[in-house]
């Protein structure tokens, strides 16, 4: 995804924007446009999301996961593995995204989760601006495990538990609410 690892994260972010079609305005816009089956779904861009998405984008740069549906599923698994700290919007978004990863490529999603568990992740940093000034190689060295990780029994168990929680949250709870209407 990044052509020169010696560039700063800010420079890599500009390259990422050019490749993905995003820009810094998406961090402050009041609405998010999500393409689904040829339609543009518009969702409110609430303040907690505005704080989490810039860090999420840095994780895309560091891991190389793309911004297509498969890549979003993998980055969600990775970020759940690293932990999203106090960013509740990141937890919520990634609990949805992990289901996409499970549908698209379950084995890769599990590997991304295991990779995240061995990484520090960027949600632990106190200053987004400090992250932007670092070189990609430096930040990757300090935060991101190699994509080649071995998967442990605890990785599988925790991954299965998170997926089950996500399914209950996104399928079970709505079904329960609907069933109370009848």
Image: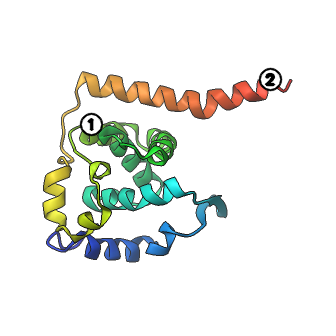
**Does 134 sit above or below residue 95?**
below
Residue 63 location (% of width, % of height): 27, 55
Provide the secondary structure element on which disc 2 rests. Answer: loop
Residue underneath mark 1: 114
Q: Which residue is drawn at the image coordinates 46% and 30% (left, top)?
A: 163
Residue 117 location (% of width, % of height): 26, 37
Q: How is the image coloured?
A: rainbow
Left or right: residue 106 compared with residue 143 = right
Residue 48 location (% of width, % of height): 50, 53
**Does 125 sit above or below residue 167?**
below
Mark 2 near mark 1, Cβ–Cβ under 8 Å?
Answer: no
Instruction: Between label 2 and label 1, give the one nearer the viewer.
Output: 2
Q: Which residue is drawn at the image coordinates 33% and 59% (left, top)?
A: 60
Residue 21 in sight here? no
Q: Quadrant of the C terminus?
A: top right
- Crowdedness near tag 2: few (<14), some (14–19) or many (≥20) residues, C-alpha within 10 Å: few
Q: Which residue is drawn at the image coordinates 23% and 31% (left, top)?
A: 151
Q: Looking at the image, is mark 2 or mark 1 earlier in the sequence?
A: 1
Residue 123 in sight here? yes
Residue farthest toward the front in the current orientation of the protein: 126
Q: Determine which of the numbered discs, if any, sits on residue 148 in the image.
A: none
Left or right: residue 78 compared with residue 38 = left
Q: Nearer the viewer, residue 135 or 104?
A: 135
Residue farthest toward the right in the current orientation of the protein: 182
Q: Quadrant of residue 141?
A: bottom left
Residue underneath mark 2: 180
Residue 71 location (% of width, % of height): 40, 54
Q: Nearer the viewer, residue 85 or 161?
A: 85
Left or right: residue 179 compared with residue 128 = right
């Amino acid at each position: 995804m990044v052509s020169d690892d010696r560039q700063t994260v800010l420079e890599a972010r500009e390259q990422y924007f050019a490749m993905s079609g995003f820009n810094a305005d998406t961090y402050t816009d009041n609405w998010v446009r999500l393409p689904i089956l040829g339609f543009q779904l518009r969702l409110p861009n609430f303040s907690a999301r505005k704080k989490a998405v810039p860090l999420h984008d840095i994780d895309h740069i560091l891991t190389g996961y793309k911004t297509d549906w498969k890549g979003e599923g993998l980055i969600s698994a990775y970020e759940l593995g690293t932990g999203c700290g106090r960013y509740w919007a990141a937890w919520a978004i990634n609990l949805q995204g992990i289901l996409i990863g499970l549908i698209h490529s379950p084995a890769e999603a599990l590997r991304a989760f295991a990779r995240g568990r061995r990484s520090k992740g960027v949600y632990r940093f106190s200053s987004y601006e400090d992250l932007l000034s670092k070189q990609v190689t430096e930040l990757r060295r300090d935060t991101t495990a190699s994509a080649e990780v071995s998967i442990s029994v605890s990785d599988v168990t925790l991954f299965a538990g998170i997926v089950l929680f996500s399914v209950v949250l996104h399928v079970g709870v709505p079904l329960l609410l609907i069933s109370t209407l009848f």
